[in-house]
Image: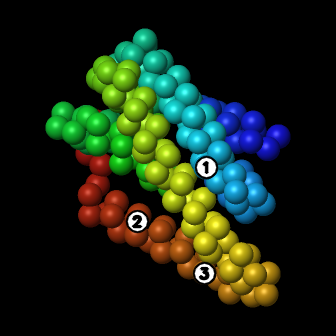
Amino acid sequence: MGPIGLFLTGIVDSSSIPFPVELLLIPLTLAQPAHLLLYVTLATLGSTIGSAILFGLARRFGGHWVEKKIPPRTFRKIHAAFENYDVMAVAVPAMMPPGFPFKFFVLVAGLFEMSWTNFVLTMFVGRYVRYFLEAWLALRYGGEVVTMVKHHPLVALSVLVVLMAGGYVLGKVRAARHPVAQE
């Protein structure tokens, strides 16, 4: 569905079903580099609308609904971030790559009734920065990476496996150092 699919994917990804927008943004950008700003803007608009839906639901249904969706320890950490830095507590997660628990921050922003204007502007800027950097990096290095993977698939697979194993081990070490208190 091209650019329209990118926009709709942004809405769905940020409001409900996780689906990395990059899976559409990067191939579209590589296919038509002149449309980089259009693709980044569509992805950003979709993501901002999807996030606004989730934000509105959190405002509407309140604490009990939000607390069912977020582990208690995570909720406390995000709550502490919002106490001092509400805009940054949305902006930084909005710029993080896929896999970061971004929706938790959107829910807490809605729960603590961050203003709609601050939320939408912060979300738009944060997502725009993220998608622009990803699209630019894809243009800058995408062809080289694709060529490397085609010619050396075992090396690419090995790097992926090592990164995944490293992430798993790091998570286990961190969990052992900071066990979750019984709620």
Please state which of the two labelled residues, at mark 2 or mark 3, is closer to the viewer: 3
Residue to which mark 3 is pinned: 159
Decide: marks 2, 1 in contact (CB < 8 A)? no
Q: Is residue 163 above or below residue 41?
A: below
Q: Which mark is residue 172?
A: 2
Q: Is residue 108 left or right of residue 96?
A: left
The x, y position of residue 177, in whole percent, is 26, 64
Q: Is residue 146 left or right of residue 60?
A: right
Q: Residue furthest right?
A: 1
For disc 3, the neighbor class at 10 Å (few under 14, some 14 to 19, many from 20) is few
For disc 2, the neighbor class at 10 Å (few under 14, some 14 to 19, many from 20) is few
Q: Nearer the viewer, residue 164 or 44?
A: 44
Please state which of the two labelled residues, at mark 2 or mark 1, is closer to the viewer: 1
Question: CA–CA distance between discs 2 and 3?
Answer: 20 Å
Q: Quadrant where the N terminus lies?
A: top right
Q: Is residue 182 visible?
A: no
The x, y position of residue 21, in whole percent, is 64, 47
For disc 1, the neighbor class at 10 Å (few under 14, some 14 to 19, many from 20) is some
Secondary element at image label 1: helix
Q: Quadrant of residue 136?
A: bottom right
Question: CA–CA distance between discs 3 and 1?
Answer: 31 Å
Residue at image coords 79%, 81% = 150
Q: Which mark is residue 37?
A: 1
| Amino acid on which disc 3 is placed | Val
| Amino acid on which disc 1 is placed | Leu
Q: Is residue 35 visible?
A: yes
Residue at image coords 30%, 41% = 89
